[in-house]
Structures are given as C-alpha cells and as structure tokens.
C-alpha cells in the first residue's frame, strides 16, 4: 500500500492500523506545487501536487515487479496509474463537477479553475476502462462525464469493530451538531444551514439544547457566525471520537454533495442518532423513522431533530437500528466481496 500523507499524526495512526511486517504500508509526504513547473503541472493535472516524486517512483517500482490489479483510491490518483490503466481499478469518492453544480463561481479566476478541474475529471474518467463509484448517483454522473464508461458501484466499507458502540446517551446537556471537514464546500454549507436555518427553531423547542460544530478548519471557515453561549465551534482536533461522544443527534443536511458521507457512517457506527437528507444520506439505504430522521425540507429536518432530542427511548432505538444497518450493508465481509468481484473482472 502506497499513500500520500501530510500529517505526521495521521501517518502514525495508519502505521498502527497496518503494522509491519504483516502489511507493507509506505507513506510519503505531499509534493509541492510551488514554482513555475509545479504550477504548470497543477494546471494540467489538478491535485497532482499531493504525489511527490518519491511516491511516484515507489509506484513504478512496484508495478515493474509485476501486479494483477492496480487499485487507485480516489479519482486524482488516476494521475499515478496513467500508464497502467488497462489493469487498474479507479475508485471515485466524489466529483467536483457535481459538488459545485449549484454554486456560483467567486470570480473569473474561480470560474477558470473550475472549468479546468471539470475537464480534468472527464479526462481521467475517460482514460480508465475500469471505474467504480461509491453510489448509484456517482455512477450516473460518471457515465455523463465519460459516456463510454460502465462504472460499477462499490460502497464505502467501514470496519465497525474500530468504532466502540454505545446504546446510552452521553452525559451533559442535550447536544445537536455536525462534524466534518469544513474546507469541503458541501460540509461548510451544511453547517451554515444548520446554524442559520434549523438551529433557531430547534433551540426554541428545546431551550436547554446546545449546538456543537467540530472539524477541520471549522473556526477558520465558520468564525463569522454569530456567537452565543449555546454554540461551540472546535477545529483541527487530534481525535474526533470524544466529540461524537458528546452528541445526542448529528444533523448533516448538505444542499449538494456527491458520495457517501463518512461522518454519517461513523455516527451510525458509534451510536449517534442521525438526521439527514438526500445528499447527506447518499448511498446509505436508511429508512426514515427507523434508521434515522430523513427529510429534504427545513421543516422536516427541524421536526425530526426535535423529536429525537425530546425522546431518549427513540434515540436508543435509532442507535441500534443504524448500527445493524451499517454492519449489514458496509461491513468488511460484504464490501470486500464486492471489491474482489471487481478485481476478477479485470483481465
């Protein structure tokens, strides 16, 4: 396994999960996109700066030794396997052209950058004959960008044994919140929606409720939100699990955002009841009123959040149902089986 990794702590955690000599995990620091050559490469191959020269050399060394299938995780890793496309499986987590479809460019430069990124997405997808997306919706979007492709759906597997499940409510005041990477536009927009459109009515109905927003660049991106004693914003924490443990309800309802939302899956794994919408629950076959609260309009989201905050027995029922769904649909056995089927289709 070869990976780029810019954070030393993340690298240490990855090496602990995949210890030597049982696994051969090679982590490399991100490359650079500074200087004329770096900027030129980034313009032609967006996000290729993540892959350093050492990482590229390691990939080629492994390929020269011989391989059956080159598994490329994330669309932009397609730059690495370009010369081995016929024997590679390219996995797509999300698409910029889908995530920014309903967001206006911030100016001329942003418009040009988006056009270049969209063109690069299509170029990569058309180059690889074996492509997989996390959801049916992603597969449909891939077919639109690369009409000749026949993408398969490979759901995002999650090892539930790594997530200690709890049936009990957390201590402290009833807390609703969102956890994620707020530099990613769909999560940022979901947080703004929660704070501005949903939270005021939730707070009015549950006066002792608290709002918790946690994740990468949370303060940098959301620092201009009006402050209040009931709002807490925490960013760039070393361990996210303690913050999940403070939530009675996770509410993640992005206006638009492709792919499976990992933090929704993790909430289900840990026992945090979820309220979400079509985009937040993409790829997860949950049922409203059984596995989560599900609605696309503000009124429906608010109603379901209030219902959960006010009913401890309902929260427990949702925890149990969501965890069972997660293990059944996204556990290691069913997801690994589908990956092996995809490998077998590559000749």
Image (cartoon, grey):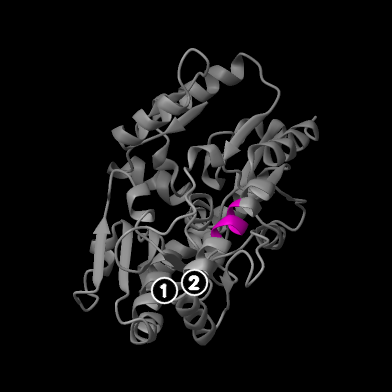
Image quadrant occupied by the C terminus: top right
- In the rendered structure, the answer to whether residue 194 lies left or right of residue 294 reads left
Residue at image mark 1: 105
| Residue 197 visible in the shown view | yes
Q: Would residue 321 be counted in the magenta stretch?
A: yes
List x then y, in percent, for residue 148: 77, 54
Residue positioned 68% across, 61% down in the render: 285
Magenta-colored segment: predominant secondary structure: helix
Mark 1 neighbour density, 10 Å: few (under 14) some (14–19) many (20 or more): some
Which span of residues is magenta-colored? 319-323
List x then y, in percent, for residue 295: 58, 78
Residue at image mark 2: 253
Give the mark nearest the N terminus, 1 or 2: 1
Instruction: Residue 334: name its quadrant.
Output: top right
Residue positioned 71% across, 62% down in the render: 140
- Looking at the rendered structure, the secondary structure element under dot 2 is loop
């Amino acid at each position: 396994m070869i990976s780029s990794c810019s954070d030393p702590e993340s690298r240490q955690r990855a090496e602990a999960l995949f210890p030597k000599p049982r696994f051969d995990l090679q982590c490399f620091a991100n490359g650079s996109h500074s200087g004329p050559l770096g900027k030129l490469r980034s313009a032609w191959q967006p996000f290729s700066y993540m892959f350093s020269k050492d990482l590229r050399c390691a990939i080629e060394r492994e390929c020269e030794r011989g391989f059956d299938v080159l598994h490329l995780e994330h669309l932009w890793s397609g730059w690495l396997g370009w010369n081995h496309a016929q024997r590679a499986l390219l996995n797509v987590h999300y698409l910029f052209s889908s995530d920014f479809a309903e967001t206006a460019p911030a100016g001329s430069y942003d418009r040009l950058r988006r056009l270049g990124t969209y063109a690069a997405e299509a170029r990569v997808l058309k180059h690889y004959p074996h492509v997989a997306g996390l959801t049916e919706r992603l597969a449909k979007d891939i077919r639109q960008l690369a009409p000749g492709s026949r993408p398969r759906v490979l759901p995002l597997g999650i090892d539930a044994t790594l997530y200690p499940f709890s049936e009990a409510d957390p201590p402290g005041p009833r807390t609703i919140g969102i956890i994620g990477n707020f530099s990613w536009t769909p999560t940022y927009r979901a947080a703004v929606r929660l704070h501005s459109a949903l939270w005021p009515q939730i707070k009015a109905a549950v006066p002792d409720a608290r709002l918790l927003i946690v994740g990468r660049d949370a303060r940098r991106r959301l620092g201009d939100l009006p402050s209040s004693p009931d709002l807490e914003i925490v960013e760039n924490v070393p361990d996210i699990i303690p913050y999940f443990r403070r939530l009675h309800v996770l509410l993640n309802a992005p206006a638009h955002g492709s792919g499976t939302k990992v933090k929704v899956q993790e909430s289900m794994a840990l026992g945090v009841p979820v309220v979400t919408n079509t985009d937040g629950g993409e790829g997860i076959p949950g049922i409203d009123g059984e596995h989560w609260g599900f609605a696309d309009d503000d009124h429906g989201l608010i109603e379901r959040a209030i219902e959960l905050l006010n009913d401890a027995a309902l929260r427990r029922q949702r925890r149990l149902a969501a965890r069972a769904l997660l293990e059944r649909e996204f556990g290691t056995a069913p997801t690994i089986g589908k990956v092996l089927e995809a490998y077998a289709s590559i000749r």
